[in-house]
Amino acid sequence: MKLQNGMYANRFGLPFDVYLARALTEMKKRVDKKKAACLIVDGSVGEGKTTLAVHCADFLNGAYVHKKPQNPEPFKPIEFQGFYELDESKLIKLEKQYSMGGEEFQQVLLDCVKEKFKVIIYDEAGDFSRRGALTGLNQNLNRIFETYRTFKIILILCLPSVATLDRDIFLKGVPRALLHCQGRDENAGFFKAFSLKQVLWALHDMKTHPVPQLVYNKLTPNFTGLFYDLPESRSKQLEEISSKGKLNILEEQSLGNDKYLTIGQIAVKYKASPRSIESSLKVAGATPDKEINGQKYYDKSNPLVSNVIALLEIKEDKRKEKMKHIEKLAKIKAEKLEAREAKAEKLKGTFMVFDKPNKEAVE
């Protein structure tokens, strides 16, 4: 659908249904209270996940200004009245607020904090072909949700399936909604919106269903809707960024996954901060063997690098041993407590109950 006078040519001037606008507005209110919030957009390849994510990010960034009616109807939600006008100056900066891949995502997130952006998009297309990508993503998300809610940043995740995320993230209540894209045609894309509670049910059913994607058809969505394509110029810009990101991935993979490592990959594997890894490599005198698009790669066969990795492995082994010891102590403590409770239960009712003293005998 083409823009007409700065608005999409539908009743409300939005690139998607007004029900989604209302849900996104509620999400913004949550973030204003310094509560972490995340929107998940999933679906198969070609269903328009990235397009819908960009539309949502634009709305959250304030690009659609709500023009309320002078005399609103009293019993109708205000979001369903009036129209929305596009402010192109508030559209997200794709080159700064859209990321492909975990390591790029961390850098983009830091830039968003520095420049006080309100929303960031993470697109799986740049990460899921890499080994260990899911583990790194889930570890990063747990840290991000704990730390960056202070900066009131909303995260939009584009994934092939919501099932790729750790259940722990959902139990924390951070993801507020899931938009499942399905049935896109030449005119528009379509989505189903699910609440956090419904997502948990979906995750439960996906474990046993032979075709996990069909689980969505069993659930009743909170609402459904459609969305339109991005304007041609913006769509072209997004395609260029996406193509460049995928080309970088091919160049990185040509290095050989088993021979070269980045600081981020080492940090994820040995559960350390990238800053500490970089410092250790610097102290050891190790320098990058290759650099692609600003990303530094270290050869594992380099003695200086292998020495740092060996020390990290020792630390990781000690950490695991410590965790085993803590778990063992906790188990012993639980067994002692259980034995004490069993003994108390056994003794219950064995105490002698003395008769009350005879009043006359006392006198």
Image (cartoon, rainbow, N blue to C red):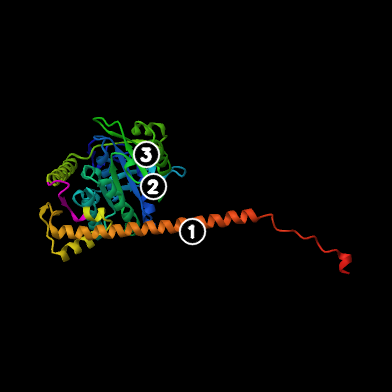
Q: Is most of the magenta stretch helix, strand or loop?
A: loop
Quadrant housing the N terminus: top left
Q: In what element is the residue under mark 2? A: helix
Q: Mark 2, residues whose alpha carbon is within 10 Å: few (<14), some, or many (≥20)?
A: some
Q: Amino acid at mark 1?
A: Lys
In magenta stretch: residue 337? no
Q: Height in image: 30 above or below 159?
A: below
**Residue behind mark 3:** 193
Identify the magenta region: 255-264
Location of residue 79 in the rendering, given as x and y in whole percent from the top left corner: 38, 44
Q: Residue at x 22, y 57 (%)?
A: 111
> Which sits in the foreground, 288 or 178?
288
Q: Residue at x 36, y 60 (%)?
A: 322
As drawn, the label of residue 333 is 1
Location of residue 110 in the rendering, given as x and y in whole percent from the top left corner: 24, 58
What count of labels does the image hold?
Answer: 3
Q: Amino acid at mark 2?
A: Phe
Q: Mark 3, residues whose alpha carbon is within 10 Å: few (<14), some, or many (≥20)?
A: many
